[in-house]
């Protein structure tokens, strides 16, 4: 809930000399907030009159208003946008690294705190009859999980994430006994999702990918392979041979 004293404290943190020598670009906004009947729409309109350069200086003040003024993030149209891949590459040892980034619709990453979060949603169907005996039990049947890298969620204001997919994935130690003549594989689906309500729901899918891991026998070796594709027509593959 908005508190004028707390607001003034944030102003002082951003500018200890606020309006000591001349009127600030935030003068009209500050005067508006001193009225008891101020509506969120009025605050939005006043904030739009302040330049981007000035808001960079008053970032704590802006963050406070977005937290405490009802519906203000919605009125300003705060959202995660332009989710894009920075790198999607094969790493030595067979893994794949995916680095992605995004922006705030308002141009201020701090506006995304604390409401906006990003996570990954991994899900899969029941494995094929050929692959199921060689998978971890949770992956033999349909299932799913959530997370981004080592975290369940990433704060939207961070603006980037790194996701590494190892080549073995859900193959269990039983795969060392695989001696079939044909390739076996399993597939998982990955959605990067955004929340605008502090994680209560994740209704916005930012991008979708498919990850396929496969194994073939080549004499005394197993060839592990991984492919990730989707998003903006992106694709990368990797493989490694292991003597067993």
Image (cartoon, helix red, strand yellow):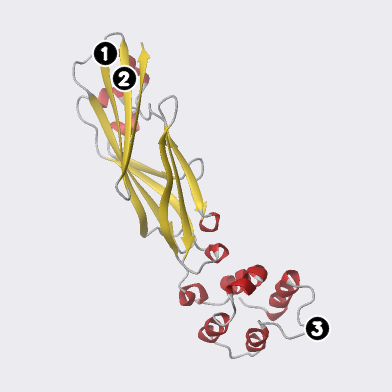
Q: Are marks 1 and 3 in contact (CB under 8 Å)?
A: no
Front residue of 76 and 7: 76
Alpha carbons under labels 1 and 2: distance apart? 7 Å
Give the residue number, with chain letter if any, for mark 2: 223
Residue sitting at x 63%, y 88%:
32
Front residue of 171 and 76: 76
Q: Residues within 10 Å of mark 3 (few under 14, many from 20)?
A: few
Where disc 1 sits, the SS reads: strand
Q: State the mark number for residue 218.
A: 1
Residue sitting at x 33%, y 15%:
176
Q: x, y percentage for residue 158?
A: 55, 54
Q: Are marks 1 and 2 in contact (CB under 8 Å)?
A: yes
Say left or right for 126 vs 84. left
Q: Are marks 3 and 2 in contact (CB under 8 Å)?
A: no
Q: x, y percentage for residue 44?
A: 53, 81
Dot 1 or dot 3: first in sequence order is: 3
Give the residue number, with chain letter if any, for mark 3: 21
Front residue of 104 and 144: 104
Alpha carbons under labels 3 and 2: distance apart? 72 Å
Q: State the mark number for residue 241.
A: none
The quadrant of the image that shows the N terminus is bottom right
The quadrant of the image that shows the C terminus is top left
Q: x, y percentage for residue 190?
A: 34, 45
Dot 1 or dot 2: first in sequence order is: 1
């Amino acid at each position: 809930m908005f508190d004028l004293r707390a607001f003034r404290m944030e102003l002082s943190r951003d500018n200890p000399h606020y309006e000591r020598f001349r009127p600030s670009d935030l003068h009209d906004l500050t005067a508006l907030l001193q009225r008891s009947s101020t509506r969120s729409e009025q605050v939005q309109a006043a904030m739009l009159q302040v330049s981007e350069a000035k808001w960079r200086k008053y970032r704590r003040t802006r963050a406070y208003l977005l937290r405490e003024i009802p519906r203000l993030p919605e009125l300003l149209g705060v959202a995660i946008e332009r989710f894009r891949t920075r790198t999607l590459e094969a790493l030595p040892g067979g893994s794949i690294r995916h680095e992605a980034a995004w922006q705030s619709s308002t141009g201020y990453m701090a506006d995304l705190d604390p409401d906006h979060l990003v996570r990954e949603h991994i899900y899969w169907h029941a494995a094929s009859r050929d692959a199921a005996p060689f998978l971890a039990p949770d992956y033999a049947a349909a299932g799913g999980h959530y997370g981004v890298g080592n975290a369940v969620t990433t704060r939207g204001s961070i603006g980037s994430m790194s996701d590494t997919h190892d080549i073995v994935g859900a193959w269990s130690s039983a795969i060392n006994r695989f001696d079939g003549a044909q390739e076996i594989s399993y597939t998982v689906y990955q959605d990067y999702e955004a929340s605008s309500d502090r994680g209560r729901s994740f209704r916005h899918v930012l991008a979708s990918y498919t990850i396929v891991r496969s194994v073939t026998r080549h004499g005394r070796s197993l060839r592990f392979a991984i492919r990730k594709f989707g998003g903006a027509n992106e694709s990368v593959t990797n493989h490694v041979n292991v003597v067993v």
